[in-house]
Image (tube, rainbow, N blue to C red):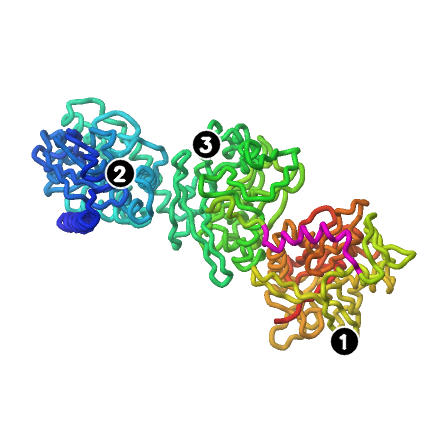
Amino acid sequence: MKKFISKSITLLMAIASAGMLSACLDDKVAGGVTEDAGLAIKDLNVAGLAQKGPFVKGSVVTVQGVDCKTMKFTEEEFTGEVKSNKGDFDVDDVNLSATCALFSVSGYYMNEFTGEKSSDKLTLHAITDLKDRKHVNINVLTELEYERVMKLVSKEKMSFDDAKMQAEKEILAALGLVDRFESFEGLSIYEKGDGNAALLATSVMLQSDLDAEKLTDRLDGFASSIAESGEWDDEKTKKKMTDWADSAKSRGKYETIRDNLEKWSDSDEIPDFEKVVDEINKDAKETTQKIPEEWSWDVPQSARLNPNIKYDTMIDPRDKQVYKVVKIEVKEHDYSQVWMAENLNYADSVKTPSLKGQNWCYNNDEKNCKVSGRYYTWAAAIDSVALANDSKNPLNCGYGKTCGINRGVQGICPDGWHLPTLHEWGLLGVALGNAGVAGDSLKALTGWDYAGTADNNGVDAYGFAALPTGRMVSTSSWSNVGSNVYYWSSEEDGTYEARYSNINNIYTKFYLFQGSKKYGQSVRCIKGDPSTAAIKSSSSSSVGETKSSSSSAKLSSSVVVSSSSQVKMSSSSVVPSGWSWDVPKELRFNPNIKYDSMVDPRDKRVYKVVKIEVKERDYSKVWMAENLNYDDSVKTPSLKGNSWCYHDTTKYCEVSGRYYTWAAAIDSVALANDPKDPLNCGYGKTCGLNRQIQGICPDGWHLPVRDEWGWLSVYLGNAGVAGDTLKALTGWDYAGTEDNNGVDAYGFTALPTGRRISETNWSNIGSNVYYWISEEEDAYEAQYSNINNIYTKFYLYQGSKTYGQSVRCVKDE
């Protein structure tokens, strides 16, 4: 008891002293109201109830003035006392310079469980705004919240109303209660109602069979934990409370509690606390039990959060829901962003008409939204109605429409937050290592054990706590619940599809895909005004300029682009916009780029190379500007039977380079014979290749890892535009439309060389290019990058290791 009172007095004196000093310095009173302006609260008579069980007659009630904006105490103090053993009190003639006040009661109370007066005194507090209030109750819930409210206002700079709302939500969540009640200082253990039942249930469970001194310690521990983090994770205390509740129920003690309260209050309106005790008891047992490794709709979302991460909270002003948020900071990648650590669960279709018929809970059961958040169509996620009504830049977006969103949008997110762009998802993936491992870093510690193997779960390195909530494919069909999660981005992919990020339970990877705008998928918001959203680097702006001017760019002294989108090779021939095996690759290079050259010492072949530099992104790499064409299977046995020219015609290799299997591209024979770290890689084998390798590239160069392709796409704007930036100026006009060609902004000069599927099957010549990556997917597939003629995008996929695909080498650093 002494410990708790001492702590409270120390806190009050410290803040009061600071408040008095501040008042003396600026000749103002608390809350910014000057003495000349009068009092904020004048001659107010305040009544209320002081309840643990009811405080007894003569207990002292104090009202202390508090600045609503700083939580500093004023010198204003008023006292009263409890008038009867029902706990009722009055404090008359309260005059305050600000509307906020801290109430406290100190005295003996009636123990609901024993029916007797407590053995020692107890002090409880309640912080409130008296602007529109004349009745203030003091109870265990107001005690648990008041320090948290003061911290949120003074340290986090929240408004008093928002701080109260958040603190109350956090306390109820800590108890396993999700309903929203009126302010805690309006609750009473003497009246019917869900909120009053929650108060009484909390009061009796915290009391259990403790005396007043031990109850003080329990309240102090709970309140301190909430004040610090908004959470209460004292599993030992929760276990004691559940054990007591089980025992009390079996011994019929709930009836004793009800009888005592009815006697003290002269009323039969005691709330139905028994049901709430059972609810708290059930939740406490669930959270103290081992969390299942696999997905379950019975496990609260909060139980999946990483206990080793310090989360912050955000309150959605539209519906007052409280969300955990986390700052993901990777200093070596200069990355720092605040993300929501749980999925959005906003559903007000009156305030936000875009939601009408466009959002769901799993199996249409509202309680499931407490676990997974809601599932939204893309139109709902971007808030299509708001975009259509934007007075400055209206956009008509949705299924069956192409609106060309090229800016950040708030979407369905709260004010101060926005729907992530594809680029922002890409930056997150790259910052966490690369897309090949980022999924593992984002997945929650539990919930992903879909097939019974615990290593499907993630490491949740930064507290993102991604859960496998799957998606809604139609109103009667839900897909991949327990194995995948899908997060919308703000960007569309044509008339019927939009872009999203994906994590699954099998791999550590993080994917960027596209799918139907009709799907119901999850939303994670990112902090910041939409105007600050990362869309693409400033170099991407010049990309657009390059494209518009490329139609008149000179290719050489005798090669210019004509208005008919054809390039003159001489006075009598032209370079077609589309693919042709008769056009030398030299005529596809960008004439506005200064290329260097590299000689392969193995066969003396000369290659164009180019330094791709994006200074504002601190990116600089030297890449080959044409595909590798090395084929000496004597010097390099991995090549034997594993590299080809198109249709086995050598002259075509001078246009497209060679096509290699993945085993050839990584030089599997050299890897197997590595004396330091031999690896047995190839088709039908899993070798776990996880380091940079030279592969089939010349000395001083290497086969790109997935991360290098990822960084390249991110720094060229994002994966949504990087393909256009890398494609050659000509050669891609597959369907006769000139805008299939690229802008080749940095001289990479990607050509649509397709790939070899089998000895008699060549695929997508003239429409796609496929570049091997050094990393495998499994025993039969490996990873590659892809660009196609239809879209401006740049993809990272996986396919059979037996395919014949192109190789671009990157220079060692």
Amino acid type shown at disc 3: Glu
| Label ID, residue 245 | 2
Image location (x, y in percent) of residue 244:
25, 41
**537 over 391 or under it: above or below:** below
Q: Earlier in the sequence, mark 3 or mark 2?
A: 2
Q: Earlier in the sequence, mark 1 or mark 2?
A: 2
Q: Which residue is mark 3?
A: 366
Disc 3 to disc 2, C-alpha distance: 28 Å
Disc 3 to disc 1, C-alpha distance: 66 Å
Instruction: Judge whether residue 288 can be spotted in this image.
Output: yes
Q: Quadrant of residue 119?
A: top left
Image location (x, y in percent) of residue 237:
27, 47
**443 over 343 or under it: above or below:** below
Q: Secondary structure at mark 1?
A: loop
Q: Which residue is mark 1?
A: 602
Amino acid type shown at disc 2: Ala
Q: Secondary structure at mark 2?
A: helix
The answer to whether residue 541 is magenta is yes
Q: Which residues fall within the magenta stretch?
A: 536-555
